[in-house]
Image: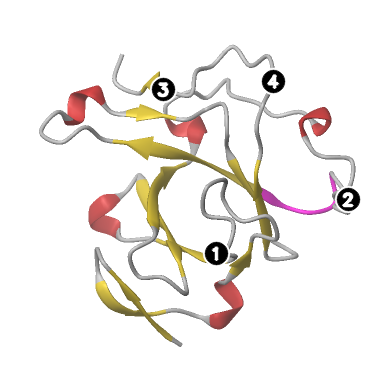
């Protein structure tokens, strides 16, 4: 399947890699289908690209890359989620903000990680309460 992206132009993706976000991303709730695009030249950063809107994409990364002690608890998840924790593989990403011309000031939103159930191809953005991290956590301390 081919999709258009603002950052990479037209790219081919495997339809099995599409992640359904039933609640969308806050502020972009009408968009439900995303894919994680990996490019070796942008590692450790990925693009969380909306399949249906080439202009909607978020730079994301695995939070453990910069903060290996970062954890989520089952209590952080909404009780209506039908995931079987411990049996299904989860991936976690945080959204990155890179100020124009000041990459050394990049931050990550550790208060609202995107969690993906890899088995179900389903994801959500959690809003954490009482986290010791910030929604503007500096990455390059």
User: How far is disc 1 from disc 4 in space, using C-alphas?
Assistant: 25 Å
Q: Residue at x 28, y 28 (%)?
A: 106
**Where, quadrant-wise, is the C terminus in this rendering?**
top left
Query: Which residue position holds label 3?
Result: 136
Q: Earlier in the sequence, mark 2 or mark 3?
A: 2
User: How far is disc 2 from disc 4 in space, using C-alphas?
Assistant: 22 Å
Question: Label 4's element?
Answer: loop
In the picture, measured across the screen, residue 14 lies left or right of residue 97, that is right
Question: Label 1's element?
Answer: loop
Q: Which of the two marks, 2 or 1, is nearer to us in this view?
A: 1
Rendered view: 56 above or below 43: below
Query: Which residue position holds label 2?
Result: 84
Is residue 60 shown to the viewer in this render?
yes
Question: Label 2's element?
Answer: loop
User: How far is disc 4 from disc 3 in space, using C-alphas?
Assistant: 15 Å
Q: Earlier in the sequence, mark 1 or mark 4?
A: 1
Query: Which residue position holds label 1?
Result: 31
Rendered view: 93 above or below 18: above
Q: Residue at x 69, y 29 (%)?
A: 72
Residue occupying the far bottom of the picture: 1
Q: Residue 14, image x and y in percent?
A: 51, 80
Q: Earlier in the sequence, mark 1 or mark 3?
A: 1
Q: Main secondary structure of the magenta part?
A: loop
Q: Which residues are magenta?
A: 86-90
Query: Which residue position holds label 4?
Result: 129
Rendered view: 85 above or below 69: below
User: How far is disc 2 from disc 3 in space, using C-alphas?
Assistant: 31 Å
Q: Earlier in the sequence, mark 2 or mark 1?
A: 1
User: How far is disc 1 from disc 3 in space, using C-alphas?
Assistant: 24 Å
Q: Residues within 10 Å of mark 4 (few under 14, many from 20)?
A: few
């Amino acid at each position: 399947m081919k999709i258009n992206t603002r950052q990479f132009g037209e790219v081919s993706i495997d339809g099995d890699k599409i992640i359904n976000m039933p609640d969308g991303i806050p502020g972009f709730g009408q968009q439900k289908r995303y894919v994680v695009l990996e490019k070796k030249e942008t590692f450790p950063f990925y693009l969380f690209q909306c399949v249906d809107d080439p202009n909607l994409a978020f730079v994301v990364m695995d939070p453990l890359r910069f903060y290996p002690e970062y954890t989520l608890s089952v209590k952080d998840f909404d009780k209506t989620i039908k995931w079987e924790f411990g049996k299904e593989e989860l991936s976690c990403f945080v959204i990155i903000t890179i100020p124009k011309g000041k990459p050394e000031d990049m931050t990550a939103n550790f208060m609202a990680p995107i969690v993906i159930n890899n088995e179900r191809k389903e994801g959500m953005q959690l809003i954490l309460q009482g986290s010791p991290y910030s929604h503007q956590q500096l990455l390059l301390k």
